[in-house]
Image (spheres, grey):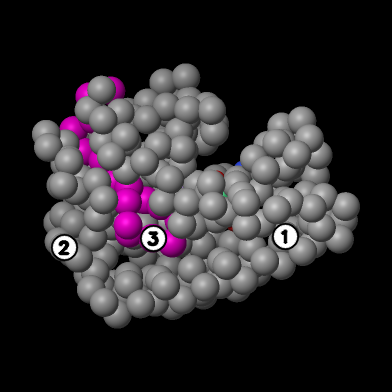
Amino acid sequence: MIDLHTHTTESDGSLTPVELISEGRRVGLEALAITDHDTLDGYDKAAPVAHGIELIRGIELSTSWQSRSVHLLAYFPHGDPGNEFRDWVLTLNHQRRQRNLLLAEKLRTAGFPIDFDEFSRGAGPRICRPHFAAAMVEKGYVASRQEAFDRFLAESGSCFVPREEPNFVEAVLKIRLARGVSVLAHPARIVRDPSCLAAHLGWMRAAGLLGLEAYHSDHSLDGQIAWAALAREHSLIITGGSDFHGAGNSKDELGTGIDGNLCVPYAVVDQLRSVL
Ligand code: AMP
Ligand code: MN
Ligand code: MN
Ligand code: MN
């Protein structure tokens, strides 16, 4: 069993990279990729303690495609992506910070002030919307993080602030130039079912997309089979992961997903290595 989609305190997860390695060992993972939003720092911090578990460099990027936010996973099984890619990722962090300032201001204007400095100290290096949601629960503005998203923070929420995101094709190219494997993350969050994506995968493949995350804890078992079939039809490799954010953040369990709906085979790691 492996897990190629996880988050740590370097973005919006609740375990540190070192704690995630321990948890991975406890649940019996053979391989693990840390795919924090907009940073490779999780890998860098976990690598020294990752004995007995194969750690793969990864990152999750939010990109824009037809006015939608589409998440791309990038994996670097052959080594470090290099400074040009790392510098580009730093510019994405800058866009995130700008979004966060605007979001805090919008919430304040709407009557929900949060002490940005105070909560950013506790949140770690990269502030994500779930940190805002947690702060709103703490302030008593909402009863749950999900309510914070549903009413205020989600795209349909009243305080949503769009982020400047790199174009999907640009991101795929940057990943490819850095010797990375780009994978379309949780496709069911982009379109309702596989048939809706089929018409687009041809040009996405031509642009350099190499994989589809058919196995994801959001997907039902039938869904995983259908997404995997679509990936095969378009000669994309099939990857998978839980999207683990840590206990208490969601129902996802590391490696096994929601109610055990996930079991990603080790063969996926071999495919990641051989696709480039
Ligand atoms: P950000 O990258 O700061 O915009 O935060 C995005 C993260 O917020 C995602 O990776 C999810 O972990 C979480 N998120 C996004 N939309 C929702 C939602 N509707 N309900 C709950 N969590 C969400
Ligand atoms: Mn997240
Ligand atoms: Mn995502
Ligand atoms: Mn994720």
Residue at 25% across / 22% down in the picture?
Answer: 26
Say above or below: 233 vs 216: below
Residue that numbered label 1 is attached to = 104
Residue type, label 2: Gly
Residue at 28% across / 23% down in the picture?
Answer: 27
Residue that numbered label 3 is attached to = 39
Q: Is residue 147 left or right of residue 40?
A: right
Residue at 54% across / 28% down in the picture?
Answer: 248
> Can residue 267 be seen in this snapshot?
no
Is label 2 or label 1 in front? 1
Magenta region includes residue 189: no
Is label 3 or label 2 in front? 3
Picture coordinates of residue 68, whole percent (x, y): 63, 64
Picture coordinates of residue 234, whole percent (x, y): 36, 57
Mark sitting earlier along the chain (3/2): 3
Residue that numbered label 2 is attached to = 79
Residue type, label 1: Ala
Q: Is residue 180 left or right of residue 243?
A: left
Say above or below: 269 vs 109: above
> Can residue 259 be seen in this snapshot?
yes
Quadrant of the drawing holding the N terminus: top left
Magenta region includes residue 37: yes
Label 2 residue SS: loop
Say above or below: 145 vs 253: below
Mark sitting earlier along the chain (2/1): 2
**Is label 1 in contact with label 3 (beta carbons under 8 Å)?**
no
Quarter-of-image position of residue 37: bottom left
Mark sitting earlier along the chain (1/3): 3
Instruction: Quote the CA–CA distance across marks 3 and 2.
Output: 15 Å
Tell me if mark 3 has few (under 14), some (14-19) or many (20+) residues whose alpha carbon lies within 10 angstroms of its own. Answer: many
**Is label 2 in contact with label 1 (beta carbons under 8 Å)?**
no
